[in-house]
């Protein structure tokens, strides 16, 4: 077997270390199974990589490359678990940045006046907020056990249509609910999450229950320890009732059991990858849920399902026990029905655990009485004013060679026109949001995100994801995953093996330049208002900034009809009766102010109090 280190050294010595050449040549040798590189392989690899190698160099390379019998296989033989991170850490904090690390007690809003008595029908409070449910449980108007049974019943009732459950944790839930009721009756109240049933995205390890990552081939996977977030919610007295779906390996809403659905329109998927948490929360089947985001996986399903989602600052919530996709971009956060719900959940799950080395000792001090009127606010003016586009301009094309090709072009043209019509319709929600903020007395400074090749930086995510699931690709078990299209993980993981190490580093360096530039945009501001479906989503995931996504209105009967088939490519496929969303961005570790502002907007609009008609979803 070849020594890859000597191999790369030889390539580097001839100026080939920064190209695709080494990876391509190595892959060819592995594919041939000859354990020996030939001149013909060098020629083929050089043609793919776009380099020229003189014949004299080829012989020199062969003599060097075929001497050793060590290489990649030594590392492959380690069978490195997904939980092992690289000896490299991403840190969103730039020199000179400061944040609050003095912890203070949580200051909730006043107990809801409507929660003074026990409900006649328990399902009347299925869509209640965390503070509302907490007050009922605290005052013993409703028991944790009753809430738990109610939510378990709803999960079972609606799962056949919405497909948001991987595993019900019934025995665990009933034991925890019983414990919560006993403690509360003894005056041992742990806080606002005590006794409240919740759902976990099924990439969070839970002892005694399978953790499937939504993926074929992992259906029976078990871990011996709870994820840190699960442990912390246990300590707060919350009751885990279900492991909820995610698209396979945190992509989209298709998992090994089907496609998770949008409660507002079950003909549509719930988007992903936090598909189950968003769908179950919107359907009133849990009090709150925990999702994750790497590049839109809280934002997208929160938008589609009309939830309030919080993507915290990178390094605020420990990811110990969560599936790794991208070590430099993964984040865990709550998906809830209201902003204060997110704040109360974040207060429990944030902070160092001594295991996730990216987590800073930053304080999150929720104060519902914070004066949001004193916050300095910007808005992405150009993004709000940008005309709808299908992402590409109509371009001149050569005449179609066949009738089939002409038909495909016409269908693509219709799809682009439909996209523009939906986007143009949805502009009214963004315009209405800016007008509402002005009515609230908010003075907004126009700002613009700096121009950088952000999409090129996403190569870091792809490379890290391919490394996280390297053995899956090499073993051929990637064929067990449900989705096998050109944009799905199996193909992306294979393609990522051609990303040169040098280009990964160059993307990281470009990312640092972008971080510096974006920090200047936030300078002097606590909140930036943004359209959800704009490039800020990619930008702020790369820089690690927090975001709150909340419902921002509902499409009327005059809305353009959605596509006949939801292919997962567009979050805003819309349609009558479906929700639109708005995003608020905050400073690194600035969640307390960000959430206070978002809560003020939410309470001024009240869109979060609407819920889907589930009778139609059965």
Image: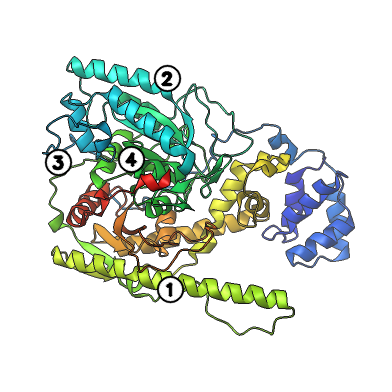
Name the N-terminal-most of marks 4 and 2.
Answer: 2
Q: In terms of image quadrants, where is residue 123?
A: top left
Residue visible at 19% across and 64% down in the picture? 437
Crowdedness near tag 1: few (<14), some (14–19) or many (≥20) residues, C-alpha within 10 Å: some
Name the N-terminal-most of marks 1 and 4.
Answer: 4
Name the N-terminal-most of marks 1 and 3.
Answer: 3
Marks 4 & 3, CB-CB < 8 Å contact: no
Q: CA distance from mark 2 to mark 3?
A: 33 Å
Q: CA distance from mark 4 to mark 3?
A: 22 Å
> In the structure shown, which secondary structural element does the residue marked by tag 1 occupy?
helix
Position of 600 relative to 175 (above/below): below
Q: How is the image coloured?
A: rainbow
Q: Which residue is mark 1?
A: 421
Position of the N terminus, as image quadrant, is: top right
Q: Which residue is mark 3?
A: 109
Marks 1 & 4, CB-CB < 8 Å contact: no
Name the N-terminal-most of marks 2 and 1.
Answer: 2
> In the structure shown, which secondary structural element does the residue marked by tag 4 occupy?
loop
Q: Which residue is mark 2?
A: 171
Q: Which residue is mark 4?
A: 284
Q: Is residue 387 left or right of residue 121?
A: right
- Work out whether residue 125 or residue 353 is closer to the camera in this orientation and state it: 125
- Work out whether residue 411 or residue 175 is closer to the camera in this orientation and state it: 411
**Residue 485, percent from left and from top:** 64, 55
Task: Indicate which label's residue lies in the foreground, 2 or 3.
Answer: 2
Task: Indicate which label's residue lies in the foreground, 4 or 3.
Answer: 4
Residue visible at 52% across and 40% down in the picture? 324
């Amino acid at each position: 077997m070849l020594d890859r280190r000597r191999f790369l050294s030889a390539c580097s010595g001839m100026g080939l270390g920064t190209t695709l050449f080494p990876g391509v040549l190595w892959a060819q040798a592995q594919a041939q199974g000859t354990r020996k590189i030939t001149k013909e392989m060098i020629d083929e690899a050089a043609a793919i990589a776009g380099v020229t190698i003189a014949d004299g160099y080829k012989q020199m390379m062969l003599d060097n490359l075929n001497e050793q019998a060590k290489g990649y296989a030594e590392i492959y033989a380690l069978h490195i678990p997904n939980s092992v991170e690289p000896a490299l850490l991403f840190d969103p904090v730039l020199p000179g940045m400061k944040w609050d690390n003095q912890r203070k007690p949580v200051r909730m809003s006043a107990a809801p006046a409507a929660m003074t008595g026990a409900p006649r029908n328990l399902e009347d409070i299925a869509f209640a907020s965390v503070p509302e449910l907490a007050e009922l449980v605290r005052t013993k108007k409703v028991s944790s056990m009753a809430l738990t049974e109610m939510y378990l019943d709803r999960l079972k009732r609606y799962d056949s249509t919405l497909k948001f459950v991987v595993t019900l944790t019934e025995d665990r839930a009933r034991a925890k609910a019983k414990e919560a009721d006993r403690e509360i009756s003894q005056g041992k109240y742990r806080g606002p999450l005590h006794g409240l049933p919740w759902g976990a995205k099924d990439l969070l390890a839970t002892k005694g229950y399978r953790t499937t990552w939504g993926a074929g081939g992992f259906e029976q996977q078990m871990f011996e320890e709870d994820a840190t977030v699960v442990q912390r919610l246990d300590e707060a007295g919350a009751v885990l009732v279900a492991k909820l779906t995610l698209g396979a390996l945190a992509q989209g809403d298709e998992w090994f059991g089907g496609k998770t659905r949008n409660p507002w329109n079950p003909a549509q998927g719930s988007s992903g990858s936090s598909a189950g948490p968003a769908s179950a929360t919107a359907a009133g089947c849990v009090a709150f849920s925990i999702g994750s985001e790497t590049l839109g996986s809280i934002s997208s399903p929160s938008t589609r399902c009309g939830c309030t989602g919080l993507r915290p600052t990178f390094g605020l919530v420990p990811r110990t026990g969560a599936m790794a996709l991208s070590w430099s971009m993964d984040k865990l956060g709550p998906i809830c029905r209201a902003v204060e719900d997110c704040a109360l959940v974040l207060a429990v799950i944030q902070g160092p655990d001594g295991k996730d080395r990216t987590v800073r000792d930053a304080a999150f001090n929720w104060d519902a009485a914070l004066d949001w009127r004193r916050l300095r606010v910007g808005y992405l003016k150009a993004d709000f004013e940008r005309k709808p586009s299908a992402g590409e301009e109509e371009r001149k094309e050569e005449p179609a060679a066949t009738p089939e090709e002409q038909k495909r072009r016409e269908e693509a043209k219709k799809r682009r026109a439909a996209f523009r019509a939906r986007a143009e319709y949805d502009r009214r929600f963004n315009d209405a949001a800016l007008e509402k903020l002005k009515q609230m007395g908010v003075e907004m400074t126009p700002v613009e995100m700096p121009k950088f090749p952000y999409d090129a930086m996403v190569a870091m995510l792809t490379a890290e994801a391919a490394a996280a699931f390297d053995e899956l690709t090499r073993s051929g078990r990637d064929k067990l995953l449900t989705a096998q299209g050109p944009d799905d993980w199996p193909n992306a993981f294979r393609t990522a093996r051609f990303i040169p190490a040098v280009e990964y580093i160059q993307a990281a360096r470009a990312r640092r330049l972008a971080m510096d530039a974006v920090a200047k945009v936030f300078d002097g501001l606590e909140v930036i208002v943004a359209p959800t479906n704009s490039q800020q989503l990619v930008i702020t995931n790369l820089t690690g900034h927090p975001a709150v996504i909340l419902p921002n209105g509902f499409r009327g009967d005059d809305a353009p009809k959605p596509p006949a088939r939801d292919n997962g490519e567009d979050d805003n496929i819309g349609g009558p009766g479906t929700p639109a969303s708005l995003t608020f961005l905050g400073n690194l570790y600035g969640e307390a102010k960000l959430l206070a502002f978002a809560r003020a907007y939410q309470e001024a609009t009240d869109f979060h109090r609407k819920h889907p008609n589930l009778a139609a979803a059965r």
